[in-house]
Amino acid sequence: MEHSELIDATVQFVRETLKNAEGGHDWWHIQRVWVNAKLIAQTENADLLTVELAALLHDIADSKFHNGDEEIGPRTAGNYLQSMHVDAAVVEHVQQIIRHMSFKSSFDKLTFHSPELAIVQDADRLDAIGAIGIARAFTYGGFKGRELYNPEIAPNLNMSKEEYKNTSAPTINHFYEKLLLLKDKMNTSTGRKLAQQRHDFMEAYLKQFYTEVGS
């Protein structure tokens, strides 16, 4: 199957699979990550097919919506790609990217890296910050029934992986526990450049937020 045909088929598979997904992890999130991954890939030496497939499939079965099962995403993506007769090495690479690209993976010892992972991870992190990132944070917080803000609950800046996965803290805390940290975790020069602008927007938002709540 030609590159373009496989990508078109994958887009349709992802759109159908995620048609009822939570608003911060739906097709439109995937599309934004895909677009940014292709943009970043223009300035990096990487296999574009692997980048596109990983970007499109990275949240096909997010563990946070599947009882914390961290293998359901790689497994679902692998089953799909095998059904499309994708080369086994590409399938394995895509699965490894999905397995290692999330923020919670940064709590573990680094055991896998590739230029393709760096690109897709940056693209995904870009969608977690800036105006879109703010919207996604509050959408997910509402989905989980979390408080917007509670000054009596301080951000936990030294969480373990399990604490991060199981937190029920107010959404504002998430800015300090993850979102504001992402700028300095970008892998590529393009990712870092794009992240700075979005990071600055989040800082301006928080300044306005605290002005309005009287802090």
Image (cartoon, helix red, strand yellow):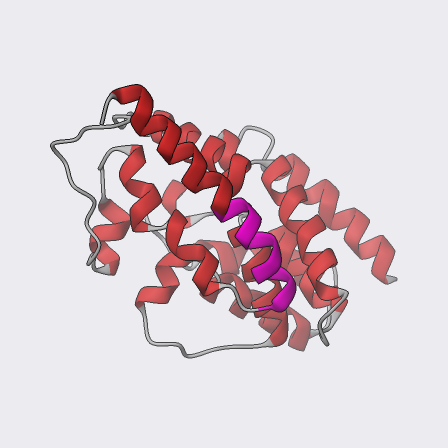
Residue 73 point in image, percent of width and height: 49, 54
Q: Is residue 130 above or below residue 185?
A: above
Instruction: Determine if residue 128 is in view.
Output: no
Residue at image coords 47%, 57%: 183
Name the magenta segment's main secondary structure: helix
Expressed as whole percent of the image width and height from the top left, the position of residue 11 reads 73, 45
* Residue at left offset 48%, top offset 48%: 199
Q: Magenta stretch: give its range.
A: 188-199
Q: Quadrant of the C terminus?
A: top left
Q: Position of residue 188 (x, y in %)?
A: 60, 68
Viewer-proximal residue among 17 and 24: 24
100 vs 77: above or below: below
Which residue occupies the foreground of this view, 132 or 93? 132
Quadrant in the picture for residue 185: bottom left
Q: Is residue 109 left or right of residue 202?
A: left
Query: Which residue is rendered at x = 67% and y = 57% of the image?
Result: 37
> Is residue 150 within the magenta segment?
no
- Note whether 163 is above or below 78 in the view shown: above
Q: Is residue 200 left or right of residue 215?
A: right
Task: Tally the numbered discs.
Answer: 0
Residue 149 visible, this orientation: yes
